[in-house]
Image (cartoon, helix red, strand yellow):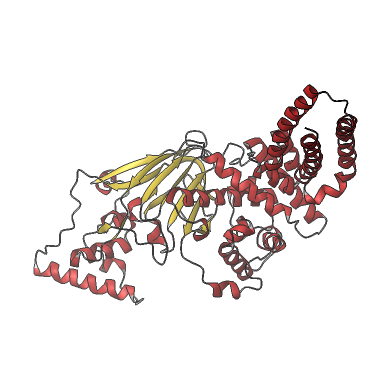
Amino acid sequence: HKHVIMTRLSLISALLSGILGLSFAFVFPRTTQNKHRPAFLAESTKLNSAVNDVLETFQKRLNEGSLTDEEKIATITASESLLEQLYELQQLSPPQYDDDQLRIAVSAMDVDAVSNMLNAGLKMDEETTDAAFWAVVKAIDTAEEQDQPLPTNVPQMIHHIFDADQHHLLTREKLTTNVTCMQPDESTGLAGAAAKMNYIFDDGDHKNLPLTEGRKCEDGECCDTCSRNVFPTFATKDESSLEIFPELSALTFNDLEKVSAATIVQFVRLVERVRRTIAYEYGLPLSTILPLQAYSRKYVAGTTQKGGGGGEGDFVTLHTDEATHSGYHYSSVLYLSTQGEDFEGGSFIFNDPDPDEDQIVDETVGTEEEEEDLERVAAMLEAWKRGEELPESDEIMLGVEEPDEDSSWQEDIRNAGRLLKPFVPTKGAAVIFSSGWENMHEVEKITAGVRYAVPCFFTTCKVEEGHYKQMNVGKPKTDECIADDWLHLLLAHRKEEPMESVGRVKELLMKWHYLCTPLSEHY
């Protein structure tokens, strides 16, 4: 009995000291251990001293023979139970934390402590994530005011925010419609060639382009399934607020000189949320998806569409994103205003073939004159592909009449054989979809007010390693490099010449994955 008890008492003493040291390492992150070590050691010394006093008393009584057999058996039983608990403690990961501790660490920008707590199983709820966002903004503003480099804990905390955003989104409502992937049919003969030429010169004829099943995804690595995903609450009211983030009303990465750090980080945050959603929904590695274009846009009733990012316009004509740019493989639109409150009209519409209507391209040719016309159009199409100059469009268009603006029946003709599926925009909602011809879409005319939206287009085309080597600073290899890229590419607030801006944005988009993920995910 004496030998068993002495051995167990020695084990208890050793295990307790080790567990106290382990707790110190987990409770206080490396960067703050020196600060907290004296107080912690003082408290642990008191605890160790008290335990050792008890153990020494047991040992003394045991050596003196003053313990009865019943007391020895009770001591062995108690020590066995205590040892089991100490062994369990020794095997545990970090000690238990609570949400209040996490929120305090987030607000203090203590990234090491936050990482430890997240690794221990805690989650950043929406309130804590919001606190982290504003702590990041404060740290950025402070560094700029003091003309200091961006601290490494800024992008590290941003990465935690991105992870939390994805977790929150998975708990929200999502409406998914799976659709068959479609691409242009290259085997439809002369009639198909005529339809393609009409499509090139007449957006209204887009719906007549001959299609076949399959994903084109030029030079990319797309998923072979296609879909439409509607998120009624992709962003919260505050996250999509033009009062909190006023520059979101018209923002491009090309002009950030006068945009607040809060708005820049929030815009990146929303784009990254879309990117991660695409990876999740289509089962693609996150590293293979990059934004090719993202901007906020204003659509004003009674104005004429002016194209490009940031321009105004009261409608968007029927189109396919991948036809607009071969590198567009996945698309999204996030809404910053609500139909019926901020504007009237302006629904987003998927324009599909009506399954009850015949959708077959007629390859039969009537008269000899019609056949000659089709051959001429086919030849023009090939010339256009080679980049040759073409005649005026009215010499090319077959069967296309000049529209009469006052003819209400034109809309009926345009929509004949089509099934329109409108989505009513609301603030914070988003639609995310594959960019192929299965998802032809348009935006109906806005009849009153102003509609704000954030269109984003993503590619799965690989960036060749040589492009990174041509940059002044290539891929980031340290946390300091990631922070420097955030500062140089997004947060410098400097005036730029147009060509300088274009170069910066190109580098930003190619480095996007490296800015928005930790070093452990840079593969």
Residue 203 in sight: yes
Quadrant for residue 132, please give it.
top right
| Residue 31: image location, x then y, percent | 80, 51
Determine whether, in the image, residue 106 is placed left or right of residue 180: right
| Residue 457: image location, x then y, percent | 48, 56
Residue, x 51% and y 33% (percent of image)? 341
* Image quadrant occupied by the N terminus: top right
* Image quadrant occupied by the C terminus: bottom right
| Residue 424: image location, x then y, percent | 43, 38
Say above or below: 380 vs 57: below
Determine whether, in the image, residue 241 is placed left or right of residue 11: left
| Residue 475: image location, x then y, percent | 62, 67
Q: Nearer the viewer, residue 56 or 244?
A: 56
Say above or below: 463 vs 102: below
Determine whether, in the image, residue 262 is placed left or right of residue 406: right
Quadrant for residue 14, please give it.
top right
Residue 390 in sight: no
Residue, x 83% and y 48% (percent of image)? 33
Residue that extends furthest to the left in the rendered view of this protein: 367
Say above or below: 146 vs 498: above
Residue, x 67% and y 59% (percent of image)? 486
